[in-house]
Image (cartoon, rainbow, N blue to C red):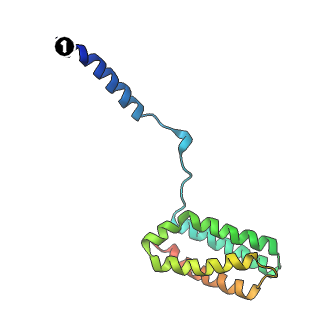
Amino acid sequence: MQTKKYIVPIVLAASLTLSACGTKDNGSEKPKEPTIAEGSKEMKQTLTDLKSQLKANEADKVKESGEQLEESWEKFEDSVKEKDADLYEKVETPLHTIEAGAKSKPLDAKTLTKASDELNSVLSKVEKLK
């Protein structure tokens, strides 16, 4: 008789606990991380913009593009690092050069163009990572 007393509260508690597991919490969803290929394409487009801004000597826009490159890279850099650490390092070097150079005045167009070309080349390889 004693066990029957406890069955109803246990079943009730278990059903409440399990029903809470099935609810969706839409408020805490993270934005989807881009794939390596998508992130690489986005960065390559920013590099194209940066080169045209360099030719037009638009220092403020070059600075924004440098910041945008870093923001784009942060979204998928961990995935690249996991798959190919050497390629990750090859992206970091010209990226840091661009970041620093984009903030300096006057702009060193030659250095920034060289770093942009190097980064663009490496991103073509990154884009092919699976």
For this orientation, the residue located farthest to the top is: 1
Q: Quadrant of the N terminus?
A: top left
User: Which residue occupies 78% across, 76% down?
Assistant: 53
User: Which residue occupies 76% across, 85% down?
Assistant: 109
Q: Is residue 124 above or below residue 1?
A: below
Q: Is residue 63 left or right of residue 33?
A: right
User: Which residue occupies 65% across, 84% down?
Assistant: 115
Answer few, some or many: residues within 10 Å of disc 1's Cα (few below 14, many 20 plus, some between 14 and 19).
few
Q: Position of residue 47 (x, y in %)?
A: 67, 75
Q: Quadrant of residue 18?
A: top left
User: Which residue occupies 78% across, 71% down?
Assistant: 61
Q: Is residue 12 above or below residue 88?
A: above
Mark 1: amino acid: Gln
Q: Quadrant of the C terminus?
A: bottom left
Q: Identify residue for label 1.
A: 2
Between 44 and 69, the residue placed more toward the observer is 69
**Local SS, label 1:** helix
Q: Is residue 130 above or below residue 34?
A: below
Between 103 and 120, the residue placed more toward the observer is 103
For this orientation, the residue located farthest to the left is: 1
- Is residue 7 visible to us here? yes
Q: Position of residue 27 (x, y in %)?
A: 56, 40
- Is residue 125 visible to us here? no
